[in-house]
Image: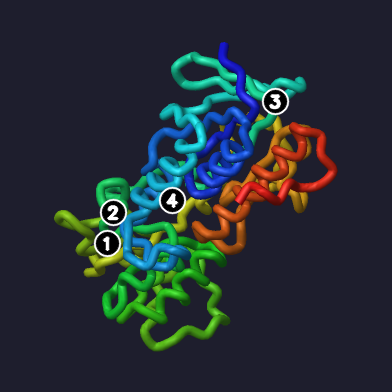
Amino acid sequence: MTEYDVMIVGGGPAGATAALYTARAALKTIVFDKSVTAGALGLTSKIANYPGIPEIISGEELVTRIWSQAGQYGAEFKKTKVVSVDFSGDIKTVFTAEGESFRARAVILATGAMGRSSVLPGEEQFLGRGVSYCATCDGAFFKGKEVLVYGSGGYAFEEALFLTRFAKKVHFVSAKFPSEEKVPGNFQVYPEARLTKVLGEGKVTGAEIATPRGVSVIPVEGVFIYSAGNKPVVDYLFGNVGTNEKMCILVDKEYRTNMPGVFACGDVLCNDVQQAVVAAGQGCIAALSADKYLRGRKSYVKDYK
């Protein structure tokens, strides 16, 4: 069994950036991720606001670039799913779907918040082609178009309001709507309704919804889904680290969990601002914290630039 200094679970902007910093710090690093398109960023079709990249690129291309950069410093990337962990000792162990096990002295958890209890018909088919999970990420690409937002939580409502800045019209489908809220003129509410199917041919062209009055189709070019809360992906942990009631991993200001040698960063923390640059910044800090832990330092090393 090969032992590492650092194992990173999740290869999105948080995990890949953490790998870049740990590998740059000469720590033997391995990253476990199903693929570059497994996370929210990898599924994003267009990114136009990542610092230092003026051209519009896909999320897959951005993640691939970070993987490549981390790989130049020796980070290894293994395409697999982590199914369980053991953090009970000084040496941590992760177990993959293929029955393999890996060990390291430190672990960084960066599995994001793509957890869903179910998938709607057409949702997977049109991911990146009209289906999105992030209005602040993709809203600008729907300027002058009609979109639909589905979800009953406050976060879904806030995302729908954000989209009114760009979209010609926002259709908000929700089982429960905060009726006391004021909405702009291009905001239409469908209370006591649910999204049943995403429609399209090559890209999204409409959405089927069910209401007490029956089933109807709304012609839209974008569908933003916030059902099931986009919950953090922590099922593989089986309670090995501390979480809150929403299953968000709890960390301190250095992104340390309650388990020594285990750190967490990115959307698995349920960040209020879900942006790639925020996740990347947290990945950097988690990596520097892991380096400090492994080398027994009292402060961060500041020369890994």
Quadrant in the rendering for residue 225: bottom left
Q: Earlier in the sequence, mark 4 or mark 2?
A: 4
Residue 105's label in the rendered image is: 3
Real-space Cα separation, disc 2 to disc 1, in angstroms:
6 Å
* Mark nearer the N terminus (3 vs 1): 3
Q: How busy is the neighbourhood of tag 3: few (under 14 within 10 Å), some, or many (20 plus)?
A: many
CA distance for labels 4 and 2: 20 Å
226 relative to 161, above or below: above
Residue 207's disc number: 1
Would residue 298 be seen by someone viewing this image from the given angle?
A: yes
| Mark 2 and mark 1 residues within 8 Å of each other at the beta carbon | yes
Q: Which residue is mark 4?
A: 40
Q: Residue furthest front?
A: 303
Mark positioned earlier in the residue sequence (4 or 3): 4
Which residue is rendered at x = 20% and y = 58% of the image? 203
Q: Nearer the viewer, mark 4 or mark 3?
A: 3
Q: Secondary structure at mark 1?
A: strand
Label 2 sits on residue: 197
Q: Residue furthest bottom?
A: 185
Image quarter of residue 262: top right
Rendering coords of residue 12 (x, y %): 48, 45
Which secondary structure, mark 4? loop
- Residues at badges 3 and 2 in contact (C-beta under 8 Å)? no
